[in-house]
Every structure is written in C-alpha cells, then in structure tokens.
Amino acid sequence: MADCGIGTRSAVKAYIKAGRVTVNQSVAKSPEQKTDPDADEVCFDGRKLTHEEFQYYMLNKPQGVVSATEDQREKTVIDLITEEKRRDLFPVGRLDKDTEGLLLITNDGKLANALLAPGKHVDKCYYAELDREIPEDTAERFAEGVEIGDDTPTRPAELIMLPDGKSARLIITEGRYHQVKRMFEAVGCTVTYLKRLSMGTLSLDESLVPGAYRRLTEEELRELKENGK
C-alpha cells in the first residue's frame, strides 16, 4: 500500500487498524496480513488499489527545481509529481537547477542504468541560447571533441546552428557535469538559457508547460526500452 502512494508504512498501519482497508471486501485483520497482488482486491476507503511494479513519468522540469529525490531546502522534481505515486521514484539523470526540459521520472533502475551507462552513448538533445554569436567553427570543433577541463575531451557532438546565430541545438552522447555549459564556454560563449528536448527516443511533449508531467505511453516506453538495450 505504501508503494501505491497511500502514505508511509506507519500511516498505512494506522489505516489498517482503523478499519479503512479491506481485502476481498473483508476488513483487513492486521498490517502483517499476506495478500496476492494478482488475485486479491485491496481497497482503501472503498477505492480499489492497483499495484504497479514500475511507474514512468515524463516531466517538463521548470527552472528553480532540483533533480533529486529529496532536499531539505529546495523543491525537488519528485515533489512535482502530485498524484498518488510510488515512494521509490527518482529522476533518470540530472538537469541543473536553472535548466528546463525533459526529465524521466521512474523507479525502474534497470532502464535508468541502460539509458545512463557511459558505454550506451544515448543521444541527448538540448536547445541553448547564448550571450553572443556562436563562432563559425563551433560545429566543427564540437564534432571533433573539445577540452572542458576533464581528463579527456568530449565525445563527438552535433551542433545545429539556428538562424539568429545566438542559439542552437546540441546533441551529445555523454552526461558530464555541466557539460553543455562547459562546451560552449570552451568556445567563448555563456549559456543564458538551456532546455533538454529529448533523451534517446523520448522527446518532450511540448504541450507540457514547465512543471507539468504525464505518464509515458506504451509506445514511448517500448521504444525507450529498445533504445536502452
């Protein structure tokens, strides 16, 4: 029940003792009562609970929110999921506090590891606005890899310059700390706005305003799992 988002384990025990939980239309006897998720009907205040092993959410992360499961001072991306949810959700990867855009929230550790594993080189596409015009040779430099202060240069990345000359889309296959910002700093530009548009086969639903989320569709999930193999 705690995994269904009803409350903490101690709260669930209190609900059971108060007679608010039924199993197959009979009041639950104790918190230790065994049930079969596939065969037994468990209800809380008359509402049937459905056990989900995994949950998958697409979130349009807004600025000012941290990519963490909990934080003593800041609102987290998990706090933005307001519907009843599993308590073991986490963000797949991180976006900086001032970065917007696509973030996958799940409790599927296997899928997360597949998408984030360095050897997988899953594409991540960002939209960036800069404080000045991007040097003409930037696309060529990014395609070769640039030094950003780490032990090794970045992997080859694809830069798509936009007509105004001060914005671009950047596709990278790594997830180093502040990587996009550091790559542009390496060519003399400062990122003033950054938004992630896609990760692997999953693209941000543009109907989601910053802070909004929705469940992944079956097709999105299937394609994402194929991409992570």
Image (tube, helix red, strand yellow):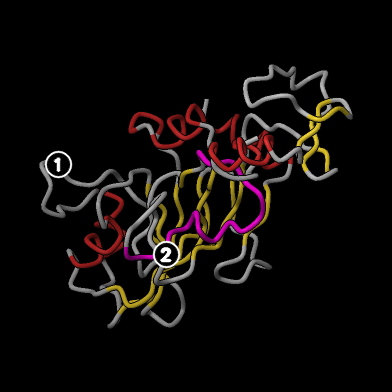
Q: Position of residue 52 (x, y in %)?
A: 68, 33
**SS category of the residue bearing label 1:** loop
* Residue of label 2: 75
In this rendering, would 140 be left or right of 171?
Answer: left
Task: Give the residue type that dot 2 points to.
Answer: Lys
Q: Nearer the viewer, residue 83 or 194?
A: 83
Residue 132: quarter of image: bottom left
Q: Residue at x 54, y 42 (%)?
A: 8
Residue 105 tag number: none
Q: Residue at x 65, y 44 (%)?
A: 6
Real-space Cα separation, disc 2 to disc 1, in angstroms: 34 Å
In this rendering, would 130 be left or right of 49?
Answer: left
Q: Position of residue 227 (x, y in %)?
A: 55, 33
In this rendering, would 140 be left or right of 160?
Answer: left
Q: Is residue 50 above or below residue 188?
A: above
Residues in magenta, as a range: 73-88
Which residue is situated farthest in the right direction here? 25
Q: Main secondary structure of the magenta part?
A: loop
How crowded is the residue under tag 1: few (<14 C-alpha within 10 Å), some, or many (20+)?
few
**SS category of the residue bearing label 2:** loop
Magenta-drawn stretch contains 84: yes
Magenta-drawn stretch contains 204: no
Q: Nearer the viewer, residue 71 or 124?
A: 71
In this rendering, would 48 be left or right of 1?
Answer: right
Q: Nearer the viewer, residue 215 or 48?
A: 48
Question: Which callout, 2 or 1, points to the residue nearer the camera?
Answer: 2
Task: Give the residue type that dot 1 points to.
Answer: Thr
Q: Is residue 179 above or below residue 25?
A: below
* Residue of label 1: 152
Residue 173: quarter of image: top left
